[in-house]
Amino acid sequence: SVPTITLPPALYPSPLPVAGQPTHTMAAELDVKRFYDRLGAIHSAFAKHREGPQWGGSNCLVLNRGQLYDDDPYLKSVCLHQYLFGYELPDTVLVLTVDGQCLVLATKKKCEFLSPAKENIPEGSSITGLTLLTRNKADDNAENFATLLKAAGLDKGSGDSSTTNGDKKKVGVFKKEWDNAEVNNGPILRGWQKQLDDADNVELVDCTPGVGVVMSVKDATELDLMKKSSVLSNKVLKHGAIPRIEEIIDDEKTVTHEELAAEIDAIIENPEKIKLNIPTDEVSSCYFPIVQSGGEYDVRVSAQSSDKTLKYDIITVALGARYQFYCSNIARTFLIDPPKAVTSTYETLLSAQEACLKAMKPGNPFKAVYHAAADQFTKEGRDDLVKRMPKNVGFSIGLDFRDPSLILNAKSTVTIREGMVFNLAIGLNKIELSDAAKANCNTKSAVKDISTYALIVSDMAVVTENGGEIMTKHAKKPSDISYTVNDDESVVSSGSDEDEDGDAALARKIAKSADNVIPGQRQSKRLAKNAEAMQDIVEGAAERERKQIDLMARRNEERLRELARANSRNKGGDKESEKAEELDTYARTKDYSDSILPNQVKVDMANKCVMLPICGNPVPFHISTIKNVVLPEADTATYLRINFYTAGMSLGKEAPANTVKLVQKYAPYASFIREMTFRSLDSQSLTQAFRQIQELRKRERQRELREMEEANLVKQEKLVRTKNERVPRLSDLTMRPVFAGRKTQGNLEAHTNGLRFISTRGEIVDIMYLNIKHAIFQPCENEIMVLIHFHLKNPIMVGKKKQKDIQFFTEVVDASQTVDVGRRSMYDPDEMDDEQRERQLRKKLNEAFKEFCRKVENTARKNDYSVEFDIPYRDLGFQGNPHKEMVWVMPTLNCLVNLTETPFFVVDLSDVDHVHFERVTFASKAFDMVLVNKDFSKQPARVDMIPNGDKDAIQEWLTDMEISYTEGPMNLNWKQIIQTVAQDDRFYMNTEEDEVTEKEAGWEFLRMYGKDDDEEEEEDDESEFSEEEAESEESEDVESDFDEESSEESDYDADEDLEEQGMDWEDMEREAAADDKRKINRDDDDGDGGGRRRGSAQPRKRRRR
């Protein structure tokens, strides 16, 4: 499905009826202002620089337009008429003098068309007069010719010798057309040309370069049309050429270059084939598209598509489209099973294009652009590529597809001006491909059969004050144009020096679709088989173990360097935040409220304190010092007991942080009041005090929680809304987490520096591009929703809670479905229609979200931000339980995620220090995975109940992502392990403090749990990290991170009223598993050390589901 796009109509109409061109019934009308602006620009340049080589020293300009000539649509006279009039006026003479007089000789109808301009010359224009001469058949235009010659100073009586060369006066004409009788032909032109050819005082010079320079600088109207033409070329390549090439490769069809080029040309001529709503009479092809492959290439724009069969190796495609006579061009190279050497050369080519864009600054000569590309090749150590460059790297483009006098070559001294538009074409031809470079290619790859290849990237570029700016936005990174269609037999190599670096290369090794498919783009069917093919080349456990040993040693060294850098940054840091803040309620007793009585408990809400009478004197106690307050049921008298935070007792997790610091500070030498009880016969007074204390404690607790929520918030920049252009938008989305427990629906927009979500209730959430750490697009395949997920660098406030994960989704399955009493047949037509509608809806939503992701990436890139959307690799996914239920966990390029269920599970792989597999035994059918964070202040993330069949694939993936792992047969007390590791400064070193005694470095000590020795198993059971101690200690003091988990989870669900209040199946199964575990532990106390290792009661209970 291709989105329907409508290009707005041009700002001026198409030409008068011309053979081979569109016809219009509307009356032709001259745009007078545009006519004088553009004619004045030509005259000003001519009058100022006419002595220069571009104008040939001419005294006047004679710009003829002959009769219709369809063989060359880019004649300079045709382009000039489109430029001045918006129409083509055949058989017309236009004379322009130095003093600004313009004379036009044409037929009566054309003079009537130009007549509105005769009396409306703008003030300040360099054009001083417009004379219209109508064709006179009676005297065969003799009088008209005399008038033209006299005005131009070419008659015999003219005595002006300032512009003569001997006895001859120079006249600027389009010399190429003047010498072509077929072009410069017509009833008027034949007589006029004879007059000048026969004149012995006239010398004809070429003024084509001068006119070309003026026309190369585009005004606002022309730039708008150039942009639309560029969009047309971009869309034809994106929705026409590329899908067709992918289809040919997928289905292994036999198609010639010429046949494929003809299909592309047909799409340009009729854009409705790709659902572009553009009138066909306003578009045409600039040239017949160029498709090349198979080792025979020509990067020149004059190349031709051959009749040879398309090969699946290195394919170049170039095409050009005209929109309302304004030309655009785009070319891309597609790499099929590319060797590393080809990809590296292509990346160098892209860097050369970037250098050319930077060199396109106003004031620089044309040759600076060419030299920028050559210098970039030299800078990157590729001098060999300089010899493979063509003679130019582009040309000026507009109404004329290629102006021969405005070429970006190594010698042109023409000055670049703001508003010029170029076709920047960086190409390399006849690059040698050695046998060594092809050695790692699959034997089935067609690249094996070529010895030379070519690369080309061509884009439309407009000159701005800061340099060149691309107008054809189609992606061209190696990951966007590379395809792998044959199984890679060389994935398992023996330490090649040319191994790719980075997570992207490692992800390609596992799922090659990562670089071949733009987020949401249709994936090649043959490409989809690569992840499955990886299973055929998975290394054995021994090979992985060898790699893991080397990997762990390398990561230990990296972690030591990271910790050293972190310590150097934190050394001497400000520790003011660790100091306790003294409590201050009143500065002096005179500040007490007048309502305070000597023997009465009073609460001062303003100063956050409680006045308690001690020996008849009111003493203020700050509310943060009060632990709790108790009001027993009243009898004859009422009692109020107040308990305080004191040293020597557990303060509890609800104790204010500052109070905890104060208690620790004064504990060594201060005396504390633990409890105070007050008795009164008047119950009303103490009851009121009790309620006020409770209310004040509640307010203070809420304030502290709010400050804790906002403590690590980073101030975000303000959103800059996009103006004067269309804003990418996705409508009818649901956001998670929700505002205040209500379902939040609205629209998501992409602006200059961030995204803005506006709910239907007017709530706004801004997400800045700079704050996005990972952006993930998950299309709908087996789920009920298609979603976009943002994992942020710094949390933002959503409602009253801070969030680091924001998600926007649309459900595919209808909210309401018909429920019938009887079961519907699988052959029920209604059922089949429903399934068909659901498939169509999935496809439509996936396409809409995909397009939005691309637009967000383009918007961010245009404003110098970087946002790239990842797609989860479904082929590498596995079942697991990260929170409370079994879900499908999938890796992305940078994360391990489950995004369809709440709470979200997002683990950034760059933050993972080590992975440990628990309960790995032959008896168990499932295991647990623990992901240890590099920040030891955070508890490890867990994924439980993973089927054993996925273990090898997960370990292979971790090895490829260069993440170390270990495995063992039992669950560990990670709270105590992390505390011990955090306190060990030499944890990642392989020696003790004496630097002589060797020890296991880093997480190597966990390898002991993977050995199958009975004696070691018994020692493991007595380990300080045993499960028994874990149960006893965790029951006393549970981490606050997990204490708050249940309250945080509730904020994710908008339908809280649908939750069951009783125990669900998970709770009952968990309780049954705990009972089984206690029975096994009792058996272990009798001396059987193997019971725990074989104890799989929990997995067996869960398998009943």
Image (cartoon, rainbow, N blue to C red):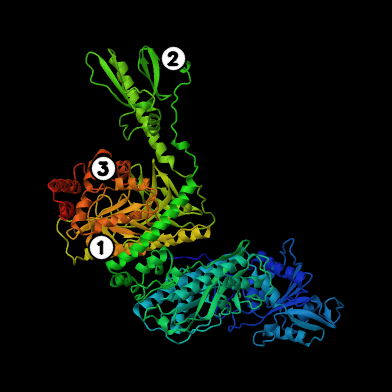
Q: CB of mark 1 within 8 Å of CB of mark 2?
A: no
Give the residue drawn at x 32%, y 23%: 674
Q: What is the quadrant of the C terminus in the image? A: bottom left
The numbered dot on residue 950 is 1
Counting residues from the N terminus, which is met first, the one under dot 2 or under dot 3? Answer: 2
Q: CB of mark 3 within 8 Å of CB of mark 1?
A: no
687 to 366, vertically: above or below: above
Q: What residue type is labelled 1?
A: Asp
Number of marks: 3
Position of 85 with respect to 153 (left or right) is left
- In 3D space, how far apart are the residues under numbered discs 2 and 3 (Cα atoms)? 49 Å
Quadrant assignment, res 653 = top left
Quadrant assignment, res 917 = bottom left
The numbered dot on residue 665 is none
Q: What element carries label 2?
A: loop
Which residue is nearer to you in this view: 103 or 305?
A: 305
Counting residues from the N terminus, which is met first, the one under dot 1 or under dot 2? Answer: 2
- In 3D space, how far apart are the residues under numbered discs 1 and 2 (Cα atoms)? 74 Å
Counting residues from the N terminus, which is met first, the one under dot 3 or under dot 1? Answer: 1
Residue under numbered circle 2: 594
Residue 980 place in picture, x, y as percent? 33, 46
The numbered dot on residue 1057 is 3
959 to 1049, vertically: above or below: below
Which residue is nearer to you in this view: 114 or 978?
A: 978
675 to 505, vertically: above or below: above
Residue 778 place in picture, x, y as percent? 35, 59
Between label 1 and label 2, give the one nearer the viewer.
Answer: 1
Which residue is nearer to you in this view: 1079 or 564?
A: 564
Q: What residue type is labelled 2?
A: Asp
